[in-house]
Image (cartoon, rainbow, N blue to C red):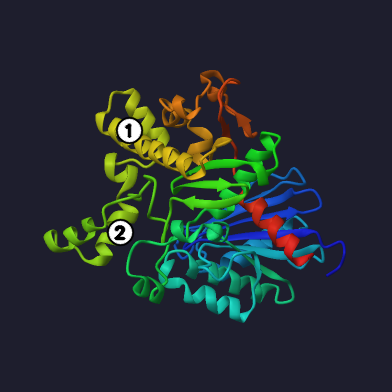
């Protein structure tokens, strides 16, 4: 690799979308970012924003047949800004891969064996890993000479002790089918826990943080000295907190009951719990802004959905306080965590005995910067820390190819 190759393209390939960012790792500057959505539909859309030349956002609508066509369209947009994929300044392409199982605990340069293992994990991540694989294969075809690096959502959580990671089911059955708690959003939890320590002026290795990643998907983690000790998502991203469309924790016998009494198939129950539950199932909306608007108008269903969401959050804050023993900070991140002040206020309310409090004035401030929202006297800091998974993926990718 040439010494001046300092750019990393980060690709996050979903089932029908590709999010991307191009970063210069000499200083972490974003050069361009964009999103291709509705891949495979007539109404596909590409939005691209060049950030270096002060260029305006560009949008294109029209059919984009598959991920290969999507990445070629991205390459065309980047080339129009003088940032083409053929640039000698491009050092590597970093890929978000959702499920790495137990095998992948660190960022990994992708070869045939790595790709085969990611493929082997498709049964435990059927919505995500196939799209990640397609993105990798397409990028390899476009730049076969370039290192492609997989950064795994599950990697940060592989430090969980066995007593936190195992389910209490027959060990032989669990091992035969790779059933255990893997956790997700790991890239975000790693980034936010480190940034929270920095905000407190502490060494991450000496800081205990409860991270609450609250987006449409939501997860909590207990991080002790930079290592994940527990996390709310499990074998799949369905376990844990109440989410936009996912139920989170539920008695497993509900699935047997629905099969026997309602005559639902395994696939129908899967769709119910993953796509028709959570806030959407409770009140018909999965957008927290809309739910808050309805609450202000006196909507009881929206209020109940919000109360259930907050109740689950409080339970995890309490549980992870017990797991860690000593907590330095609780950090809110992701779309809801960063922007919904009423969620932060309600989640912390009543937890004064745990050393937690929120300052109403600080909580009301809207900002893109990491910040404390707790009063000076509180024993445990409460922080809002914007996540940056793309930067984390780029940093890990760049560090690996330059090692």
Residue 34's disc is none
For mark 2, give the secondary structure: helix
x 66%, y 53%: residue = 392
Provide the residue designation for mark 2. Answer: 271
**Discs 2, 1 touching: Cβ within 8 Å:** no
Q: Is residue 6 visible?
A: yes
Residue reaching furthest to the left: 261
Residue 120 location in percent, x, y? Answer: 48, 76
Residue 377 location in percent, x, y? Answer: 58, 20
x 45%, y 29%: residue = 348
Provide the residue designation for mark 1. Answer: 307
Residue 189 location in percent, x, y? Answer: 56, 49
Q: Is residue 84 visible?
A: no
- Pick the quarter of the image with the N terminus: bottom right
Residue reaching furthest to the front: 325
Image: 380 above or below 32 = above
Local packing at callout 2 (Cα closer than 10 Å; few below 14, some 14-19, many 20+) is some
Residue 54 location in percent, x, y? Answer: 75, 42
Local packing at callout 1 (Cα closer than 10 Å; few below 14, some 14-19, many 20+) is some
- Pick the quarter of the image with the C terminus: bottom right
Left or right: 84, with 331 as reference point:
right
Pick the front one: 110 or 55: 110
Residue reaching furthest to the right: 3
x 63%, y 41%: residue = 207
For mark 1, give the secondary structure: helix
Closer to the camera: disc 2 or disc 1? 1
């Amino acid at each position: 690799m040439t010494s001046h190759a300092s750019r990393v393209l980060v690709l996050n390939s979903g089932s029908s979308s590709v999010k991307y960012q191009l970063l210069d790792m000499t200083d972490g500057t974003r050069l361009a970012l964009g999103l291709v959505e509705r891949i495979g539909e007539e109404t596909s859309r590409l939005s691209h924003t060049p950030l270096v030349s002060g260029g305006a956002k560009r949008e294109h609508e029209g059919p984009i047949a598959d991920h290969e066509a999507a990445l070629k369209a991205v390459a065309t947009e980047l080339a129009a800004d003088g940032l083409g994929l053929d640039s000698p300044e491009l050092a590597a392409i970093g890929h978000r891969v959702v499920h790495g199982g137990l095998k992948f605990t660190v960022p990994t340069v992708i070869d045939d064996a790595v790709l085969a293992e990611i493929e082997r994990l498709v049964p435990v991540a059927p919505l995500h890993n196939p799209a990640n694989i397609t993105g990798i294969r397409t990028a390899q075809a476009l730049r076969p000479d370039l290192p492609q690096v997989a950064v795994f959502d599950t990697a940060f959580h592989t430090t969980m002790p066995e007593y936190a990671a195992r389910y209490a089911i027959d060990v032989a059955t669990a091992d035969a089918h790779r059933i255990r708690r893997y956790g997700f959003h790991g890239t975000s939890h790693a980034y936010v826990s480190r940034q929270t320590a920095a905000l407190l002026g502490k060494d991450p290795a000496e800081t205990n943080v409860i991270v609450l990643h609250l987006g449409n998907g939501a997860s909590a983690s207990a991080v002790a000295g930079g290592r994940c000790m527990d996390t709310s998502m499990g074998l799949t991203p369905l376990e844990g907190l109440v989410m936009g469309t996912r139920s989170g924790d539920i008695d497993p016998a509900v699935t047997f009951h629905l099969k026997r009494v309602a005559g639902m198939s395994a696939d129908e129950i899967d769709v119910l719990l993953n796509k028709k539950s959570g806030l959407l199932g409770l009140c018909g909306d999965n957008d927290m802004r809309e739910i808050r608007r309805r609450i202000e108008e006196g909507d009881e269903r929206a209020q109940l959905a919000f109360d259930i969401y907050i109740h689950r959050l409080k339970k995890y804050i309490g549980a992870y306080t017990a797991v860690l023993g000593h907590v330095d900070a609780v950090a809110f991140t992701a779309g809801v965590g960063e922007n919904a002040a009423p969620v932060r206020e309600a989640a912390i309310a009543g937890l004064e005995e745990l050393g937690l409090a929120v300052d109403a004035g600080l909580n009301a401030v809207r900002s893109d910067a990491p910040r404390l929202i707790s009063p000076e006297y509180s024993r445990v800091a409460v922080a809002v820390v914007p996540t940056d998974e793309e930067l984390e993926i780029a940093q890990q990718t760049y560090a690996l190819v330059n090692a």
